[in-house]
Each structure stands twice: as C-alpha cells, then as structure tokens.
Image (cartoon, rainbow, N blue to C red):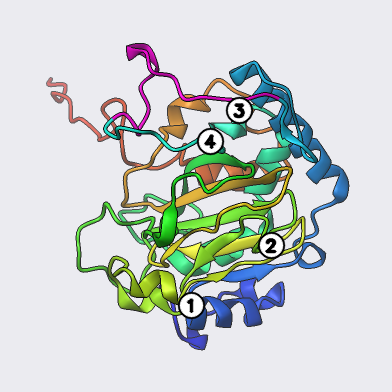
Amino acid sequence: MRTTATQLSEEITGLGLERFVLELESDGLTIVPPEVTGVTPELLDRCTEVLCRRFEEMTGCPITVEGGPLGELEWPTEAAGKNHFDDNERPPPATQMIIQQILQLDRCFRDLAVNPVADALIGHLMGPSDFLGAATGGSARRLSSSNSFLKWQGDYGYGSGLGLHCDQGLNPLPWGRTALTANATWCLTDYTLEGGALAYVPGSHRSNGHPVQPRAAEKAVPAEAPRGSVIVFPGTTWHGAFPKKTPGLRLCAVPYYRHIAVLPQENTRITLRDTPWEDCADPKRMRELIGFDDMFPYLEQNQSVPRLAATG
C-alpha cells in the first residue's frame, strides 16, 4: 500500500482526497461521504430497487428496505443447492444473502464502479502498473467481482469473532505495502452499530497478517456511515460485521478490486464481454477496470510469429 505523500497521484490531489488517503494509511479504512463522491439519491434508489427485485426473483420472497424479507427463509439442503455451510451441523439462520455479478444487472452499479473518487482511492492503494505494458492506462487496479450483501435482523453466525478476516488472505505471506485486493462498499442504507455495520480493526492493515482472536474482535469498531457513503479499505484490513439488531435491511453494493497480478473472483473479461458494459458514466475507465486490453490472461496466441521469408 502506498504510504507517503510523495506518491499521491494528480487524481488524488485534483479531487481533494488527501485526508481520505491519510485515513487509509493510518487506519486502513476511510469513509467518503456522498457530497464528496457525487452520488445522487436517484442513483441510490435505483440500486435499491434493482437489488430488491433481484432478491425476490432468486428467493421467491418479497423484500422491503423497511421490513426485510416478508417471509421465512432457509438454506437449501439438496445436493444441487450446496452452500459453504454444508460442513456445519447446524447452518446459521438465513439472515444475509449475497447477490453476485451485479454489474450485469443494471447501469446503476456500473456507474458506481467507475466513480472517479472511489477509483482514485483504489488506484492509490494498488499503485501504477509497469507489468510488461499490460495496463494501457497505467494503473494496476482491476475489477475482481461485483456483489451486494443484503443483511437483515440476526447475527448470521458470526458470533463473538465478528467474522474478522483479510480479503487478500488467499495470497501467500509475506504481504508487502501494495494492496493485492481492495474493497469499495457503497452504503445503500445507513450503516450503524445496531444496524449491523461493517466491523474493522483500525491499524490492522499494518500487521500484514491474519487476525488473531480474541484480541482482534476486542479492538473492532463499527464503520458507521450515512446512506450514499463509500467505505474503502485494502485487502490487509481486518474486517467483518456486527450483528444486525434492528428491523429492515442493511444494503450495499460492492465493486471488489484486485491488483493486475492477482487472480479475479469473477472472470469479467468473459462474463461482461457480451453485456452492455460500456453503458456507464465512463466507458474508457470501465474498459480498463475489466481488463479487456490486458496482455494476460490471454485467450489465443498474442505474440508475433515469424514466417518463412520469400526467396528469389
């Protein structure tokens, strides 16, 4: 992760984001309010509408921001519906769901992904790219996936440890100062402690290692933020979530980023290729984020091949 003022980009200084960079470097997380990012209530309403409709399509259960799911939900048990709780004797109550690949659902999510303020902060965390000319725009950040976490009343089985983890935990140690993954959580509802806010341990990114319990949970604090804020943090920050004790939804949209040298969660070059990915506020930025022009991973021969010279 970039940690000195001499490495601030023109984009950071031009947008006046210096204090948010300082928070990233000192605390490992920053909260940027909507008056800085420029997101509108109309955009947030559209994201909320699309996610609630998609939730009902996937689960068969109507849902509202005020009331949460309007029916009781349970995890599937049949072989075709395996989930990551299958090894547990008693899966936790269904009080959270992840909707994946949200960039394909609607332009509103693509507009969040190319927001210049969030993108500048992610770019600061990952730095420039000089990897064999792989990044035409010069930035190492790429999209890894795009998801929404819908959370309603309950603890989702996190327990006393709050589910604290590092997003780049699958990458082998030791980690360096450059973020290998980074997260931009767009709050589509208010984030409060009682409302199940994201939990994080300030300064934990400097450990460059995994959380140590129970000390980590004891030091965790809520990332409380008003609707429309974006919470940005590198993959080294210890984070999880507090239980949601209030009715209704805690809703977010999360473009998740990777360094160009890191494997993505979603193969966006394939999954977005035949979608209207360019239908967004900044098609050029989106093209770079997806990595359409990157050298790796290649799908066909991309190096020049000499041919037998003509004679005579």
x, y (%) of residue 283?
66, 41
Q: How many angstroms separate mark 3 from mark 2 (CA)? A: 29 Å
The question of residue 77 being in magenta is answered with yes
Q: CA–CA distance between discs 4 and 2? A: 20 Å
Please tell me whether mark 4 sits on a helix, a strand or a loop.
Answer: strand
Q: Earlier in the sequence, mark 1 or mark 3?
A: 3
User: Residue 129 appears at what percent x and percent y?
Assistant: 39, 61
- Is 109 displayed left or right of 169 in the figure? right
Among numbered discs 2 and 1, the one appearing first in the sequence: 2
Q: Decide: marks 4, 2 in contact (CB < 8 A)? A: no
Number of numbered tags placed on the structure image: 4
The residue under label 3 is 104
Kindly report the distance in space between the C-alpha atoms of the residues bearing marks 1 and 4. 26 Å
Cβ atoms under marks 3 and 2 closer than 8 Å: no
What's under tag 3, amino acid-wise? Gln
Closest to the observer, 20 or 120: 20
Callout 2 secondary element: loop
Instruction: Name the one closer to the observer, 291 or 155.
Output: 155
Q: Residues within 10 Å of mark 3 (few under 14, many from 20)?
A: some
| Disc 4 residue type (three-letter) | Ile
Mark positioned earlier in the residue sequence (4 or 2): 4
Question: Do the residues under discs 1 and 4 have CB atoms within 8 angstroms?
Answer: no
